[in-house]
Image (cartoon, rainbow, N blue to C red):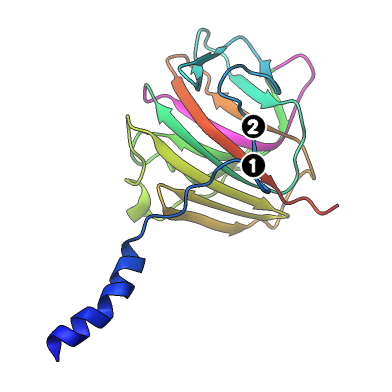
Amino acid sequence: MRILRFLLALPFLAAAQAPAPVIVAGSDWTALFNGHDLSGWVNVGKEKWEVDDGTIHGSAVSHDYGYLRTEKDYSDFDLSFRFQCVTLGNSGLFFRARFKPGTTEIIQGPQFEIDCTIGRHTGGVYDVGREWIVWPAAENETVVRQHDWNEYVLTVQGNHYTSRLNGVQMVDYTDPKRKGETGSIALQLHAGGGAEMRFKDILIRDLTRR
């Protein structure tokens, strides 16, 4: 009887251990980065953004903020990408972002945090003027891989924001003070110098109602 129960349980064990499906371009997912050049992206500021070995490589060359934003604006979306902290500098993924013309000043747009220093709330949401609006549970602060590649899956739909980091749900938040309907998606290098980041496999599924 014990052997029979074990055999019956095998399909369920296999399903529980099966890896999450890999998101690829096609159907309703579109690549934001082609792996060859920065077509579709705009450098905001003086920091260095280049394509290196199939990745977007951002390097701080000044002590100011630096951003790489999409030419196109987005409102509601699913976004999947991978990031690597070459150094332990601070970064982020801004959404519905607007900049003061000719400057690196963000005038609209929250960000999903990226910081590979343990305890810096990667996966949380920080907003200009409001600071932290939500961050992960304390037991999830160690999910980030400090020098390896991290898998980030983000959803922005109306005032509802969710993030998954390396397969772990980090936040699921409804924002009572949503600001802005649409704007660019922007990668950040934080002010202060020293930050060096890589990004790749950037895919988006547009959820905006038409």
Q: Quadrant of residue 127?
A: top right
Q: Which residues are magenta?
A: 87-103
Determine if the magenta segment contains residue 94.
yes
Determine if the magenta segment contains residue 157.
no
The residue sitting at the left extreme is 2
Q: Which mark is residue 25?
A: none
Amino acid type of disc 2?
A: Leu
Residue 149 is situated, as x and y percent measured from the top left of the image, at 38, 34
Along the viewing direction, whichever of 158 and 62 lies nearer the viewer: 158
| Residue drawn where x is 14% and y is 92% of the image | 1
Secondary structure beneath dot 2 equals loop
Find the distance from the CA under tag 1 to the CA under tag 2.
Answer: 7 Å
Secondary structure beneath dot 1 equals strand
Residue linked to disc 1: 204
Pointers 1 and 2 in contact (C-beta within 8 Å) = yes
- Give above or below for 103 relative to 124: above
The residue sitting at the bottom extreme is 1
Residue 189 visible at all: yes
The residue sitting at the right extreme is 210
Query: Is 64 placed left or right of 129 in the picture?
Result: left
| Residue drawn where x is 50% and y is 28% of the image | 199
Residue linked to disc 2: 32
Residue 177 is situated, as x and y percent measured from the top left of the image, at 72, 53
